Amino acid sequence: MTGGDDADRNGGRRRHEPPHTPPSAAAADPLDAPADRARPLPADEGARPLPVTGRAWPLPDGPEPVVLVGPPSATLVVDRHWAGERRSAVRVATVMLAVMAVFDLANGTLTAPRGLCWTAVALLLLAVLHPARVSAGDGWLASRGLLRERWVHTDLLTSVVRAEGMAPRLVLRDVFGHRVELDPKVLTANPLLWHELDRGARRSLQRGLLRCGEAPLRALAARIDGDGARRLLESSGLD
């Protein structure tokens, strides 16, 4: 019997079978799902929904996935002293270059190689003195240097360590392995930056992620509160 006879017996219409789906395609890896289908953190934990721009990864010791995102785009708070410190760094490097050039001119020893050498030294001094631009928002903190920007999720912190030395640093790490170092003086001089970091750190504590760093944060909070009270007394003339 031919295919035409089958078509005639079915009313002139040929039946089409649905395509067969391989079992491997039905059980696809959930991490390969489109980014717009990734689930954010539960809203009942008091955290903002993270912007969905990457792949979903599970939190440690928990089934709920979070979304690995790129650097934040909305800046809410910026170090208010950064612009002045940058101008000071540029001024110092420029003055040093000018002094060395004038010295060589006065002695008749200024040549192209010496000029390039002094320029390189001035640029190196600028790189050392140039301050990092610290900014923060709801759930993140970033530090931008001359060459790159580092950032962390403050509401997904795993550790906060104070590194002592000639220049004390506060080292922040989150669940994704992101790491930021900043001068604690930046936080004491900018209460709004500290407020964003403190709020995110409290969320990390509530989620059980921040297991190392309560002591440095408490010490920094006490220092900021003390500085604020002292400035208030000075402004009111009671000190």
Image (tube, grey):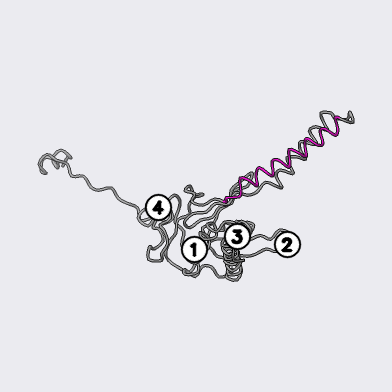
Q: Residue 170: give its label.
A: none
Question: Mark 1 to mark 2: distance in Å?
Answer: 27 Å
Question: Mark 4 to mark 2: distance in Å?
Answer: 46 Å
Q: What is the magenta range?
A: 79-105
Q: Residue 199: give its label.
A: 1
Q: Kindly state the secondary structure of the residue where label 3 is placed.
A: helix
Q: Earlier in the sequence, mark 3 or mark 4?
A: 4
Q: Earlier in the sequence, mark 4 or mark 2?
A: 4
Discs 2/3, front: 3
Asked if disc 2 and disc 3 are in contact, CB closer than 8 Å, the reply is no
Question: Mark 2 to mark 3: distance in Å?
Answer: 18 Å
Residue bearing mark 3: 188
Question: Mark 1 to mark 3: distance in Å?
Answer: 15 Å
Nearest the viewer among 140 and 108 is 108
Left or right of 159 in this view: 44: left
Q: Quadrant of the C terminus?
A: bottom right
Residue bearing mark 4: 33
Asked if disc 1 and disc 3 are in contact, CB closer than 8 Å, the reply is no
Instruction: Name the kind of residue labelled 4 in the image.
Output: Ala
Instruction: Name the kind of residue labelled 1 in the image.
Output: Arg
Q: Kindly state the secondary structure of the residue where label 1 is placed.
A: helix
Residue bearing mark 2: 165
Which secondary structure is most common in the magenta stretch? helix
Instruction: Name the kind of residue labelled 3 in the image.
Output: Thr
Nearest the viewer among 220 and 238 is 238
Discs 1/3, front: 3
Q: Quadrant of the N terminus?
A: top left
Most extreme residue toward the front is 237
Nearest the viewer among 12 and 239 is 239
Q: Earlier in the sequence, mark 4 or mark 1?
A: 4
